[in-house]
Image (spheres, grey):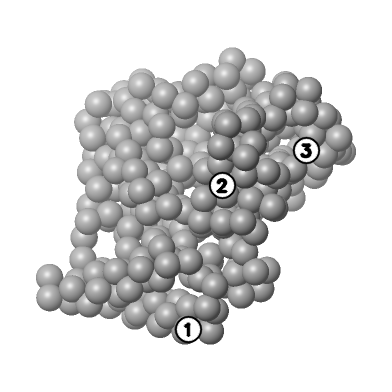
Amino acid sequence: MEKLYQHNRLLSDAEIDTILEREIYPRYFSGITAPSSQPQLIYIAGQPGSGKSTREQHYTDALNAHEPHTAISINCDDMRQYHPLFLQLQHDDDITAAIKINPDNARFTSRLIQRSYETGCHVVLEGTFRDTNSVENTAEKYRKHNYAVRAQVLAVHPLISRVGVLGRYLKERKIYGVGRYTLPSAHDTTVYNLPHTVEDFIHKGYGSELSIINRENQTLFSYTADCETDHKSTAKAAQATLKYHHTRPLTPEEYLFAQHSLDECIDLTLHDTTVPTAAIDEVLALKQQLEKSLSL
């Protein structure tokens, strides 16, 4: 299997079609119908480890409570379980497994998105907002199918989200023997690009509403499109809000949370001699970063 990926082998179109028709579409669309009102696309955006999945579930449940069987949630990470090589790749090296199937994973997600707007159901779409062009193209496709498009963005300090990623990874390893890992470079690229995509979302009109919240669900910024809105200045204000919360000092509560979480991570590495060196090094680097933040 490793040899297949050394030669950049992707799943064939026929393999993609088979997995979609037999596994993915039935899982997502069985019993799902279009709502009686205008369908909604709700982006849940933030860097890895920011807490998007909790918000994704909240909105999906709320939409289905209002009108049963009309809403689905789409998370690109969930597509990996359907890849026939992913489990073996995880056991071979769970640090790099996700990267190796990213092209196929993107094809699964793209086709699932297409089927969702063709179905006309509500969609809660979890993503990073790392690529503004991808967000723009996806929003445009939904709008062409009469969707109302809005976004909720999580403003979470990068140290807190990175600690969250590592904690999740190490806890999954303890339970399952393998975990879902996000490379620091992927996390940090998202933190850098996210404010720019938020600015574009408002300024270029990707959607009609955008809010920025923190992990405690407090609203930090809110935007609703109307003819009197100064979109350029509003977009800059949204970007500035997100950048501030990415760079401000940690609160005392955040410091204690990160300290406790990193202590848990260190304990988990001490009791698992198979944890990759890359993960151990990152835990120690984050511990040093946290201690350094006290002097700022």
Which residue is label 1 attached to? 270
Are there few (<14), some (14-19), or many (20+) residues within 10 Å of tag 3? Answer: some
Mark 3 or 1: in front is: 1
Which residue is label 3 attached to? 24
Q: Earlier in the sequence, mark 3 or mark 1?
A: 3
Question: Considering depth in this image, is 20 or 93 the residue closer to the camera?
Answer: 93
Are there few (<14), some (14-19), or many (20+) residues within 10 Å of tag 2? Answer: many
At horizontal 29% and vertical 69% (from top left) the residue drawn is 285
Mark 2 or 3: in front is: 2
Question: Does the rendering let one see residue 282?
Answer: yes
Residue 98: assigned label: 2
Residue 85 % position (x, y): 70, 44
What amino acid is labelled 3 in the image? Ile
What amino acid is labelled 2 in the image? Ala
In the rendered view, would you say 145 is above or below 40?
above
Q: In terms of secondary structure, where does tag 1 sit? A: helix
